[in-house]
Amino acid sequence: MALPRTYETQNCSIARSLEVVGDRWTMLVIRSSFEGLRRFDDFQDALGVARNVLADRLNRLCEEGIMRRVRYQDRPARYEYKLTRKGVELWPAMMILLMWGDRHYAPGGPPVIIGHRGCEGILTERLTCGACGASLDPHEVEPRPGPGS
């Protein structure tokens, strides 16, 4: 029996948020956006997701104001997908989910470590640099190969 997609009867912000971002492909599209991907074919190549599924997820993210489509070519019309401020606000949740997955599902160690750009430090669960203590945002970090890569 399939679970309903909407949770109108639940007064719960987690349930309402999951209506939008609770799908595997949606979260992986958002992750890929934080990694710098912008174009449909790049998302499709990196994720291996069916084109119709990707189109659906990108459209939904745009409808929800998490991403926006920006034309980069006229003939033929081609678009990039960029995170909005609302989308960028998902970064802390994505980082905490990554660290939780590293603890529980990465027996060989984290495949990727999120490092402080220009510093030797690594992102902590408080979203600060483990070396210098600076509060970090997505523009101040870079992925680095981890021991499980």
Image (cartoon, rainbow, N blue to C red):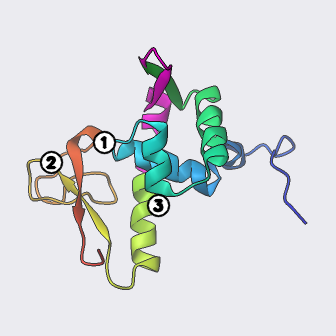
The mark that comes first in sequence, 3 or 1, is: 3
**Is residue 4 highlighted in magenta?**
no
Residue under numbered circle 2: 117
x, y percentage for residue 128? 25, 51
Please provide the residue range marked out in magenta: 73-93
Closer to the camera, 33 or 129? 33
Tell me if I can see residue 91 in this picture.
Answer: no
Q: Residue at x 9, y 59 (%)?
A: 120
Mark 1–mark 2 CB contact (< 8 Å)? no
Tell me if I can see residue 129 in this picture.
Answer: yes
The mark that comes first in sequence, 1 or 2, is: 2
Q: Residue at x 40, y 76 (%)?
A: 103
Under circle 1, the secondary element is helix
x, y percentage for residue 82? 43, 30
x, y percentage for residue 30? 48, 45
Closer to the camera, 13 or 101? 101
**Is residue 88 highlighted in magenta?**
yes
The span from disc 1 to disc 2 (Cα, nearest Å) is 10 Å
Q: Amino acid at mark 2?
A: Arg
Residue under numbered circle 1: 138
Using the image, determine if residue 61 lies above or below residue 72. Answer: below
Q: Residue at x 48, y 24 (%)?
A: 78
Residue under numbered circle 3: 97
Mark 3–mark 2 CB contact (< 8 Å)? no
Using the image, determine if residue 48 lies above or below residue 56. Answer: below
Mark 3–mark 1 CB contact (< 8 Å)? no
